[in-house]
Image: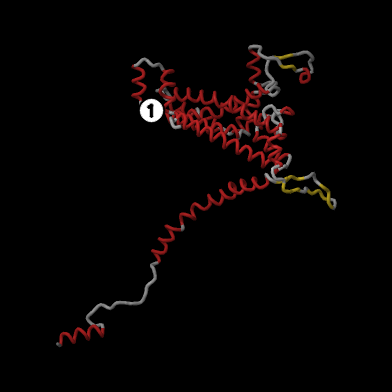
Amino acid sequence: MSATSDAAAAAVTGTGATKVDARPRGPKKSSIWARFDHAVVPYILISPFFILFVAFGIFPIVYSALISFQTYRNEYPRYISGESQVLFTRRWAGLENYQKVITSSDFGQALLNTFGLFIFSLIPQLLFALIIASLLNRRLRAQTFFRVGILVPYITPIVASSLVFVTFFAERYGQANWLLGLISFGAINHDVVAGDPGTNVPGIDWRNTRLASWTALVIMINWKWTGYNALLYLAAMQSIPKDVYEAAALDGAGAWRQLWSITVPMIRPMVIFTVVLGTIGSLQLFAEPVLFDINPETGDGGGNRHLWRTVAQLIWRVGWKDTNFGYAGAMSWVLFVVVVLVAAFNAWLTNRLGGRR
């Protein structure tokens, strides 16, 4: 009985047992920081990208779509209180800008130039890239040097390389016409320039005809991008087992037959990728045609005849030279639709070549 009384007294007084603090405690500081670190910090770290993407990606797209339905351009400077001021006119135009784009002969000609440069540049570009990649896939001396060397045109600033080609294709004293002069090819009349009536010199006026200007631009474009595509093909070829080539060689297949019967089918996804990439890049072609012009600031792309003016160049001319922002916005969205249609066609082509229907 005494033992029971002592236990009860100890329970009441707290003696002989561990005291329990019944007061509520908050979470530890370390646990709060850990929760913040896992839940909030990742979003803070990636937020600069999304902020810049919204400011320079989403906003221009939405704004260009909005002004494409408006007549938004500046008028000629007006003098108000003795000061020159540029006034902008802005009103709702509906589909008027899009109707002008569809019926515009300038846009049609620019679209023709764009697709012409695309066809005549992409096909030989990818063929040369495939052949170069096949050669680099073999055992060669200084293999690393050649593989890095084909990227030199790609890493060269496009402005610098274009200016070199502008000099190369100059009508007078250009290296291209100097080479043609060695075989007496072509004829350029220098009556006005040289002051010598009736004098024709060998060579080609590279900016006088559509064929000549397209040829020069195709050479500029292919020099820039062939090495890049060759490196992509080379990377895809590295995954092909060597046993396949050895078996084909035992069956009597030569290098050319191996390229088209083994290499091309096995790197088909990369081929389709380069076709899609090259198509989109060609539809956005801008720097080379602008810099090839004698007077790039005009944005004419071949003088009054616009021999090589592309759609992107026309949009720049309408938007920034003529300051007709609504019309330029409509052109941009029509070009976007063209790009989407071409991308959809390439997706269909990829599925067809991949065996799916």
Q: Nearer the viewer, residue 165 or 103?
A: 103
x, y percent for residue 273? 49, 32
Q: Nearer the viewer, residue 290 or 161?
A: 290
Q: Tell me: 277 left or right of 262.
A: right
Amino acid type at mark 1: Ile
x, y percent for residue 252? 36, 15
Q: Tell me: 46 left or right of 320.
A: left
x, y percent for residue 269? 45, 31
Q: Is residue 11 above or below residue 186?
A: below
Q: Is residue 286 above or below residue 92?
A: above
Which residue is under mark 1?
Answer: 240
Q: Tell me: 19 left or right of 52.
A: left
Name which residue lies at 42% across and 18% down.
257
Q: Nearer the viewer, residue 149 or 115?
A: 115
Q: Is residue 151 visible?
A: no
Residue 212, quarter of the rendered image: top right
